[in-house]
Amino acid sequence: MKERDMTVEEAFELLDSVVEKLEDRETTLEESFALYQRGMELLKLCNGKIDTVEKKMMQVNQDGELEEF
């Protein structure tokens, strides 16, 4: 599965596993940096998907202003 096809729920699950690994005292510093980067990528993915949904939930009213759908 490509990352862009991942659902928000799937991304959050992966993010949870990244956090668990970061909390593990056995994780090396190099691994921690790689995990941190992966976590940031997953957060960016989640934020993008949530922003897309929020934009779809808005509509323009008669005055040309955005309002919730």
Image (cartoon, rainbow, N blue to C red):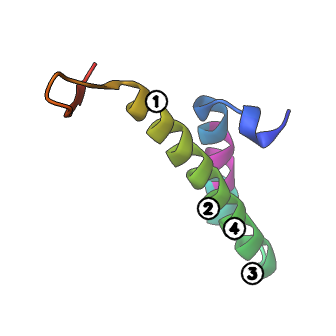
Mark 2 or mark 1, earlier in chain: 2
| Mark 3 vs mark 2, CA separation in Å | 16 Å
Disc 2/disc 4 C-alpha distance (Å): 5 Å
User: What whole-number distance in Å separates the C-alpha atoms at marks 4 and 1?
Assistant: 25 Å
If you read the primary sequence from the N terminus, does the residue marked by circle 3 or circle 2 appear first?
A: 3
Q: What stretch is highlighted in magenta?
A: 13-18
Residue 52, position as x, y percentages in the image: 49, 35
Residue under label 1: 53
Which of disc 3 and disc 4 is earlier in sequence? 3
* Residue at image mark 4: 37
Which residue does the numbered mark 3 point to in the structure image?
29
Do callouts 2 and 4 mark residues in contact (Cβ within 8 Å)?
Answer: yes
Marks 3/2 in contact by CB < 8 Å: the verdict is no
Label 2 residue SS = helix
Q: 6 or 21: which is nearer to us?
A: 6
- Residue 40, label in figure: 2
Compute the Cα span from label 4 to label 3. Answer: 12 Å
